[in-house]
Amino acid sequence: MEHTPKEAIKPNPILLQSEDLYEYILETSVYPREPKPLKDLRDASASHPLAFFGTSPDAAQLMAMLLKLVNAKKTIEIGVFTGYSLLTTALNIPDDGKIIAIDVNRKSYEIGLPTIQEAGVEHKINFIESKALPYLDKLLENQENEGSFDFAFVDADKDNYWNYHERLMKLCKIGAIIIYDNTLWGGMVAWAEESVPAAKRKLRLSTIEFNQSITADPRVEVSLAPLGDGVMICRRIS
Ligand code: SAH
Ligand code: CA
């Protein structure tokens, strides 16, 4: 533990080598374009002890662009928390678009809900209070759901990422974008195991395995982009 870099104990360390450079990116091209409802939701979540769960605005900005690029209309989100990524999605799909948003805990969603309502996009959201895996299986019981989703954002329960991937390969269309968050795990994927705090080791290993498996999966194109805590962006191609 003595060699643990200082960042190890920060819950959501900055992956970029220089905090100044990250600040520069946020101040130059992210905050000036952050929609007001997203800024409000970030402010409303700021005092939450788990506020660092919230998707970082730079990653959300890329997500918004990808949603637009694929003309996403029907999407899935796994892991809502107070709703930063959910509201990003809701603001970037058409008025008749639909999001199935799954989280085991509705309480944190309710923190962001007034802002989502104020933004006039609540009607696009179907919030499901459930564990994600059984709910995805339930969706798959209805054949109409197969190949019907344009976009998915996965940000919960990292141990199950591969299980989510197998379900999402059936639920998403060819051409759909699927984003897996926290896939650089605070940078720890590249550390020697001894340097990683014991409590973080298991999920670090799952993340390493997931990144390898998904890269070897011929059904998707991939890009592991170092935004936020690392986003594995996949496009279903077969
Ligand atoms: N995307 C969110 C952050 C999600 S944090 C944002 O931008 O703010 C992870 C969330 O996953 C937490 O709210 C937690 O309640 C939820 N979660 C944890 N395990 C889960 C599971 N098995 N199924 C669904 N949600 C889960
Ligand atoms: Ca996350």
Image (cartoon, rainbow, N blue to C red):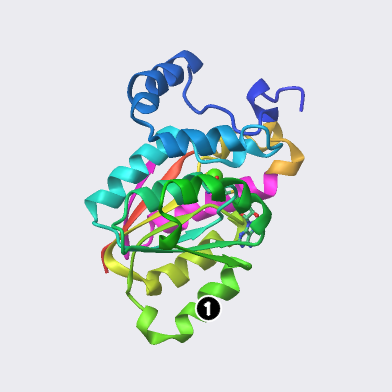
Q: Position of residue 184 (x, y in %)?
A: 51, 40
Which residue is at a point 48% across and 59% down the rendered structure image? 77
Task: Report whether residue 37 is seen.
Answer: yes
Which residue is at a point 34% across and 19% down the rendered structure image? 28
Question: What kind of element bears circle 1?
Answer: helix
* Left or right: residue 68 compared with residue 82: left
Q: Amino acid at mark 1?
A: Asp
Q: Position of residue 76 (x, y in %)?
A: 44, 63
Which residue is at a point 24% across and 57% down the rendered structure image? 71
Q: Position of residue 206 (x, y in %)?
A: 59, 53
* Left or right: residue 51 compared with residue 219: right
Residue under numbered circle 1: 137
Region rendered in magenta: 201-229
Q: Is residue 15 magenta?
A: no
The image quadrant in which ligand 1 is located: bottom right
Task: Report whether residue 181 is seen.
Answer: no
Q: Considering only vertical position in the picture, is 132 above or below 14?
A: below
Q: Report whether the residue tagged 1 is closer than 8 Å to ligand 1.
A: no
Q: Quadrant of the N terminus?
A: top right
